[in-house]
Image (cartoon, coloured by chain):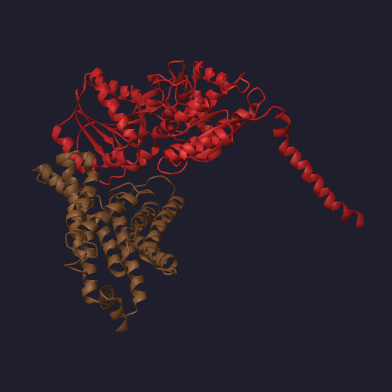
Chain colours: A red, B brown
Amino acid sequence: MMTTHAYRPLMWIISLVVACLIFVSPALAESGKPTYKIGGIFAVTGPASFLGDPEKNSLKLAVEQINKAGGIDGHMLEAVIYDTEGDPSKTVMGVSKLINKDQVIAIIGPSLTPTTLAVVPMIQKAKIPFISCAAGNKIVQPVDPWVFKTAQSDIMAVATIYDHLKSKNVKKISIITVANAFGESGKEQLLAQAPTYGLTVIQSETFGAKDTDMTAQITKIRQEKPEAIVCWGTNPGPAVLAKNIQQLGLDIPLYQSHGVASPKFIELAGSAADGIMLPTGKILIASLLPDSDTDKKVLTGYIADYEAKFKSPVSGFGGYAYDAMNILATAMKGSNGDKEKIRAGIENVKGHVGVSGVFNFSPTDHNGLGQDAFVMVKIVNGKWELLK
Amino acid sequence: MQEFIQYFFSGITNGAIYAVIAIGFSMLYNSTELINFAHGEFVMLGSMCMITFFGSMHLPLIPAIILAIVCVTAAGLLFERLAIRTVKNPEHIVLIIITVGASIFLRGLGMLIWGKDAFSIPPFSSHPPLDIHGAKLLSQSIWIILIFLLTTVGLQLFYKKTLTGKAMEANAISKRAAWIVGIPSRLMVTLAFGLSATMGAVAGVIIAPVTMCSYDMGTMIGLKGFCAAMLGGLGSLWGALIGGFLLGILEAFGVGFVSSGLKDATAFLLLLFILYVRPGGIISSADVKRF
């Protein structure tokens, strides 16, 4: 009896050590080579959390998948992620922590155009590969050697809407944009590209991101009798607009931007969402795509993995970080952690089929997406329908 | 003419909301000389409770409204009991900073409870909009104005006809005198906090169907209500009403006839202007000191 009692603690210790070895060993055994640290910086909380939260999750997912497949040339990846709260000064602090304290070899994020532009000077100074998840076109124009982005640009979204308007023979449109950076950038593109498609913007209104009522703006639009209305904003403003348009009984086709391309918009706008047309990345309508579509396999795979891991429905925005990580991984192969080689590697990524589309980077194109990254969809009875 | 009426409808709908919020500010200021910067957060709580009770739990309309208002009022009382009354050194600046802190706390709490997404609920009734000379008066606007009228009349009756209301008014005019005649002034302050939170809840409940509700909706709407209260004259019921409607209508006309970019600027420009020419507000508290 005595012996068994004395044995027990020892057995415990041994099994504990064995357990530790089992769990820790993959990291230990394979990290004969040092881990590569990847910095992530997203608006995980705050008003832009609908972007940052899925981006954070998608980055984790991509890192996990790459590690499971054996890492990059035997190097495991580790993601160090900070929250920006959508605030430029917090982003600057986070990025400087990533560069100086964590010594990451590349940075993915931030989620917003203003926060991205705020850190670009630091990136140039630190000479570190940087892939933004924000949409603004100013990020990659003019091209900076170290700065890339994976989100579709407003330019393409506007072009997709205008293509559709042109095919419907529309000449006069009213635009209504949200009074923030997203809306301003959209407005700029909407006004700049209109003449190319033979369109006249007869009126340009704005609304506040938190406005509760837009009947006044709509009344003003109604007086001008446009043939179509283009609204540029992110949730929830455009949903209020859609509701008000329905309530005032306006019978003018309404186009929204890709900023509301999520099931949440349909939920918020309810029956007012019916008939609205908008451009979106293919992720929203992955199941509607023909099997011949090159993106379909990647999309369905990403959606299944994301929903299995995080138990929440996928959004259209997490893909920006997922693509960024996978593009980075491609570029990192054979780079041995050399930042200049990684940077040049990203510029050489061609035909990468990602969640947001097919990427073809070059020294002059640091976004890599073409207009085919967008498709036009229409909301019919609360469901997305692909428009040709 | 049609546009003019439409802008006017839009203005009075928003104006009624601003007025209810402004009353909440004014009432509390009246009793405690305190500006509660967490007031917008009580509006948010009202909306979000409505989302839960009416939107998710599908309670009938009236019980859902009552339950939402009761919950928020309780939150207001709790706030007074835990954060305000326990302050050792109740100077104005300390208390105001506490309310700012409380607003951040409540916003965070809202985010934890309801998440970061926006929500919406259907209107209280689904009547088609009324058509008046081509302008549309939405059914929810009618609800908003009705509930607003009910609230103000009820409040007026409470202050003028009930003993508790009169005691609160007495306490507001002079704490010491009220105390001498045996009015428990501490209780009156608690009551004022509760009533002010109720006003916030009412505003939150009536705007839930017209807007999209999210945990961070309270800040801007709280500020607008504050503007309305300042505009009309802080501490005066009529001032809050005038301020609210003036702000709502000017905003709507500003959007319609000047530029939609100026909507929020209208409120703050107006506030600056009033503070400059008439620091006490339209119904200056020098003329009409109290409710």
Name the side, left or right, on which B187 lies relative to B167: right
**Residue B54 appears at what percent x and percent y?**
35, 55
Vertical arrangement, residue A17 with respect to residue A65, above or below = below
**Residue A324 appears at what percent x and percent y?**
50, 27
Of the 4 image quadrants, the one containing the C terminus of chain A is top left
Question: Which quadrant would residue B158 be assigned to in this image?
Answer: bottom left
Q: Which residue appears farthest toward the right when viewing the image?
A: A2
Q: Which of B48 and B127 lies nearest the eye of the viewer?
A: B48
Q: Which of A363 and B285 lies nearest the eye of the viewer?
A: B285
Number of marks drawn: 0
Q: Which of A286 and A334 lies nearest the eye of the viewer?
A: A334
Vertical arrangement, residue A187 with respect to residue B172, above or below = above
Vertical arrangement, residue A25 with respect to residue B178, above or below = above
Q: Which residue appears farthest toward the bottom when viewing the image?
A: B181
Of the 4 image quadrants, the one containing the N terminus of chain A is bottom right
Q: Is residue B129 visible?
A: no
Residue at image point 55% right, 32% down: A99
Name the side, left or right, on which A36 lies relative to A156: right
Q: Which of B177 and A203 lies nearest the eye of the viewer?
A: B177
**Residue B58 appears at what percent x and percent y?**
37, 54
**Residue B57 appears at what percent x and percent y?**
40, 54
Name the side, left or right, on which A75 lies relative to A123: right
Name the side, left or right, on which A58 lies relative to A22: left
Residue at image point 44% right, 52% down: B108
Q: Is residue A80 visible?
A: yes
